[in-house]
Image: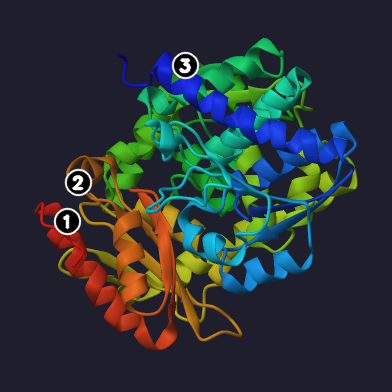
């Protein structure tokens, strides 16, 4: 079976599970009862919220969408006081079944998630998760993808939402197959979007704003991977292009990426590889700038919605900068005020990322190398809603990353620290599972944790930060040695 294939049996089982959720939603709508949707604030979660929101709107449902950083007892109790007939969790819930089983056991509840789960959901809940069907939720199907399968089961007209699920998957960095393509069930969703005429795919350079912005701006706006001394700095981007004899203009017209010749593209890639190497980074990082491009063909070329990866960054910016309603509105089809506001948020988001990365790299001790992990000490400087983004960017820019990266920051107004961890596919293949490690370590120190094998998060009391980090360092070593990490 090809690496990116999902068996017919797995897919049939997953789709049957999705239909269970769709049937319960239809029953609730037909009874004219209230539905409470709860989703995560990252790009995948906002895409999922937008998909279910649009599907429910088409059904004429009574519903509310709520976006959260995480799920705990306090939030579960708050949801219960709303007395909804049905609660839908999108991109949340599978890692919090203990909370849901105890706090919401008397509610009609649907969980549409793709994170790892360590226990059984209450039999009365409808739990749709690729892991329950032997499908990898960290690379083959995102949270938005799970929601899309349910929307598709609700009504075939919702096939026109497939491209939003593609945006969610890319925002969740699930483009882990050859040429940075989506695979698994995501590949099937890509096909749905292409069939609906809403998506086009090709292999090319993947600069941010590749179709819409002058080359120097596209280069400066690229943050995955983060290009030292170029990302966020247009003047240095212009100077870099001049140094390799690539003119950003032809006459009085700015050139965009599609205007470059194949020879110029090769020269640019080679120069970027040399640039990364000069900064102590692997030249192979430059290869991350070439891969499968996903273009939303019905979006205006001049907007940040045209390229699916750029769309995902826009969504992530609205979530991380506290403007989640803007992101959900765009996913539901708003191309007016919400899109205009999102553009402003995106600019602020880029400036914030540049500021935080600059602060972290200013002093060597802020990114500390322990025996088995790297630790980025965000302390109270980095906003906790941004720590996941910073963790992802750092993990792609540490030279020859052979250890997991764990970043954290204090949560304002609470005696808690937010942790975000990232690792590499080679370490996952050796048996590393960050979701398990952070869950065990967080629970040991009065916190909560979980996620995927390759990316995970946790919340831990501030007073336990040092002990938590030490335990994570120990558990990584034990797991890579093939030793049990529980008990």
Q: What residue is shown with label 3?
A: 262
Q: 10 Å neighbourhood of mark 3: few (<14), some, or many (≥20)? A: few
Residue at numbered disc 2? 431
Q: Is residue 139 left or right of residue 398?
A: right
Residue 453 vs 136, above or below: the answer is: below
Residue 39's x, y, as percent?
Answer: 65, 52
Inter-mark Cα distance, 3 to 1: 45 Å
Rendered residue at 76%/22% (across/down): 155
Contact? badges 2 and 1 (CB < 8 Å): yes
Q: Which mark is residue 62?
A: none
Q: CA distance from mark 2 to mark 1?
A: 7 Å
- Badge 2 element: loop
Q: Earlier in the sequence, mark 3 or mark 1?
A: 3
Residue extending furthest toward the top = 195
- Secondary element under disc 3, as helix, strand or loop, is helix
| Position of residue 280 in the picture relative to residue 422 (left or right) | left
Image location (x, y in percent) of residue 51: 72, 37
**Percent x, y for residue 83?**
79, 62
Q: Disc number at residue 479?
A: 1
Q: Nearer the viewer, mark 3 or mark 1?
A: 1
x 29%, y 74%: residue:
469
Label 1, secondary structure: give it.
helix
In 3D space, how far apart are the residues under numbered discs 2 and 3 (Cα atoms)?
40 Å
| Residue 308 visible in this rendered orientation of the protein | no
């Amino acid at each position: 079976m090809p690496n990116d294939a999902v068996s017919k049996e797995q897919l049939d089982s997953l789709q049957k599970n999705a239909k269970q959720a769709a049937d319960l939603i239809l029953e609730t709508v037909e009874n004219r009862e209230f539905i409470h949707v709860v989703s995560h604030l990252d790009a995948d979660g906002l895409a999922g919220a937008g998909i279910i929101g649009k599907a429910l709107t088409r059904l004429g449902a009574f519903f509310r969408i709520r976006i959260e950083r995480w799920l705990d007892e306090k939030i579960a109790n708050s949801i219960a006081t709303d007395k909804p007939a049905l609660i839908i969790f999108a991109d949340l819930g599978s890692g919090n079944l203990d909370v849901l089983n105890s706090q919401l056991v008397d509610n009609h509840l649907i969980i549409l998630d793709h994170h790892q789960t360590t226990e059984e959901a209450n039999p009365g809940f409808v739990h749709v998760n690729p892991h329950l069907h032997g499908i990898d939720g960290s690379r083959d199907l995102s949270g938005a993808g799970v929601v899309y399968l349910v929307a598709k089961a609700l009504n075939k007209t919702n096939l026109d939402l497939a491209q939003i699920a593609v945006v969610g998957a890319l925002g969740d960095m699930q483009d882990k197959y050859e040429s940075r393509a989506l695979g698994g069930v995501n590949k099937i969703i890509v096909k749905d979007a292409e069939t609906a005429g809403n998506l086009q795919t090709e292999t090319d350079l993947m600069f941010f704003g590749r179709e819409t912005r002058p080359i120097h701006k596209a280069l400066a706006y690229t943050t995955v991977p983060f290009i030292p001394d170029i990302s966020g700095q247009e003047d240095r981007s212009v100077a870099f292009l001049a140094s390799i004899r690539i003119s950003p203009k032809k006459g009085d017209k700015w050139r965009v990426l599609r205007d470059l010749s194949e020879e110029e593209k090769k020269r640019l890639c080679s120069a970027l590889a040399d640039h990364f190497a000069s900064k102590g980074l692997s030249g192979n990082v430059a290869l991350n700038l070439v891969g499968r491009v996903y273009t939303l063909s019905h979006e205006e070329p001049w907007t940040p919605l045209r390229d699916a990866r750029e769309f995902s960054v826009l969504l992530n910016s609205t979530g991380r900068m506290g403007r989640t309603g803007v992101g959900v509105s765009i996913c539901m089809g708003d191309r007016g005020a919400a899109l205009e506001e999102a553009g402003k948020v995106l600019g602020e988001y880029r400036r914030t990322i540049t500021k935080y990365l600059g602060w972290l790299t200013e002093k060597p001790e802020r990114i500390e190398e322990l025996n088995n992990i790297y630790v980025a000490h965000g302390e109270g400087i980095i906003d906790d809603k941004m720590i996941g983004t910073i963790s992802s960017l750092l993990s792609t820019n540490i030279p020859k990353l052979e250890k997991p990266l764990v970043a954290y920051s204090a949560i304002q107004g609470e005696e808690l620290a937010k942790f975000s961890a990232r690792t590499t596919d080679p370490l996952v293949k050796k048996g590393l599972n960050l979701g398990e490690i952070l869950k065990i370590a967080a629970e040991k120190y009065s916190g909560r944790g979980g996620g995927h094998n390759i990316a995970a998060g946790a919340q831990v009391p501030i007073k336990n930060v040092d002990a938590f980090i030490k335990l994570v360092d120990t558990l990584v070593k034990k797991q890579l040695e093939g030793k049990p990490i529980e008990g």
